[in-house]
Image (cartoon, rainbow, N blue to C red):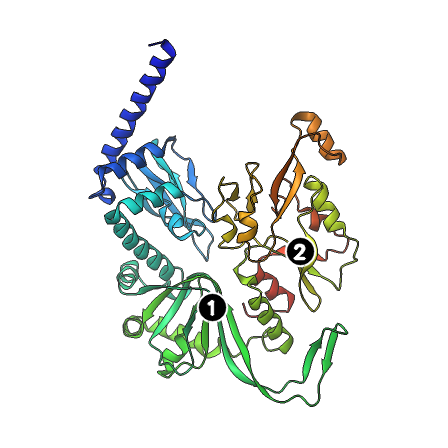
Amino acid sequence: MDDDFKLSFNSRIAIMMESRDIALKLTRASFFLGTPPKALERLATEGEVLHVEAGEVIIREGEYEMVCFVILSGSFHVFVTDTETHEKRKVRTLGAGELLGEMSVLSGTPRHAEVTCAEDAFLLRIEKEEFLAFLDEAPVAKERLDAEYRRRSLTSALKALDVFSVIEGPTIETLAQKVELVVAQKGEVIFSPGQMADAIYLIRDGFVKLSRDSLDTESEFFDSRFDKVSFNPKAEPRIKEYILAYMGQGAYFGEVALFHNRPRVATATALTRTELVKINKVDFDKLLFRYPEVRAELQKLAESRYLSAPGLAREADQDMVRWATSQDIFGSDAVLFLDLNHCARCLNCITACAKLHDGVTRITHNGIRYKNILIPTSCRHCRQPTCMIGCPTGAIQRDKTGEVYHLDTCIGCGTCARGCPFGNISIVEIKERQPGLAGMVQRLLGLASDGKTKRKAVKCDMCKDYKYRGCQHNCPTKAIVSARPSEYFTGASGGVGL
């Protein structure tokens, strides 16, 4: 046996012993009790052992990062940002055998807390796919984690409400054990007019539309032939949806009918996959009886919430948000909006994009349009990106800030393009970048690369490798902006009630 083989063999034995030691540590943790030994050994082998120094931040609030950790030794402080003071406060300390970041891995949502190392420690870093595979092999651990996920998510959702700020922690935690976590799929009706009010709902994640039917006697309509608003004096009255509000994470709804003990008068519909915390009427009434100041505040808000919606009072704004809903825009994190009233048609946005991306533009004006607002053909960075499903090389990834992008390992198979419901991913043939200084000079001068041609998927990556977004930076009239849809529509029409 030669020396190289001996070294390789001995290294493998050392790794196996280390993995067995890790698996042994895991068996002593309460979360892993009853887990099949082979599943633990596989988890220990596939995971990566990290040494973390005191003061090091391993999880940052608001970031997308689909990995979780098991604490092998040491301890970690967990901080959350106060919604009023915007200051970080410590909520708990976790030690050996406990998990970190697993809730975001399960829900696919951004991190809800910051985790800092309290003392020198060792962690087992586990990728999302490895962790989910482990849960499939360990149903007892999965059931335990599901229960913990519900407890934590429900408690945090209740504590996040400003009107519940006066309620003591133990009372919130007791209530969290009684409420339900309800998952509504996109387009699902949560409640309808005529149903008796039996609960109040808090939105943990996602978007909900509240609407009611009204008699439409408007004769105004948008005439696409002449690109302007026209009038039809012979228009017949018809039933039309009137949008009361669009609500996102942290909002609550359904309380008005509860206070008046009457049937629902509005329809609540999930615009995206939405996680809801459902507080039943009995538990809600008990809570308000114990805290009359909470009742007074909620009643005050309930009386005025939907009576004054400045943005939605105008028919033009109603039509705009209906259009945005029909195009699935609210399920996106970052959308490019082009105001045609200010656009000079210079195409600087397209030219700049191409220069920054190897001569291939990631944006075109062949998008969808509502009156003067055009949404170019460009990636929307969806909250639930279906384009990432099924990539054979794992080349399409999500940045910690939520931006979806492609790696150089892309083989141009087209799986992501077929998975995009909006047709915002293209498969093109490009020349590979020449490495080193010569390649950098060629790109700066806009010269073609001498590399080999390869197929690759291209899409907007929000210019993640640059300090600015090319399309916006080079627009002379500032007609194009990138924004979260709820924020854009609120600002564009003086308050659309999102």
Residue located beneath label 1 in the image? 187
Q: Which of marks 1 and 2 is nearer the N terminus?
A: 1
- 85 above or below 163? above
Identified at 48% across, 42% down, the residue is: 392
For this rendering, which residue is in front, 327 or 157? 327
Image coordinates of residue 27 in percent, x first then y, are 22, 37
- Residue 388 percent across, percent down from the top left: 50, 48
Residue matched to label 2: 481
In this view of the protein, can residue 399 be seen by the observer? no
Comparing marks 1 and 2, which lies closer to the viewer?
1
Comparing 418 with 152, the one in front is 418
Q: Residues within 10 Å of mark 2 (few under 14, many from 20)?
A: some
Q: Where is residue 240 in the image (x, y as percent from the top left)?
A: 56, 81
| Amino acid carrying mark 2 in the image | Val
**Quadrant location of residue 332?**
bottom right
Report the number of numbered marks: 2
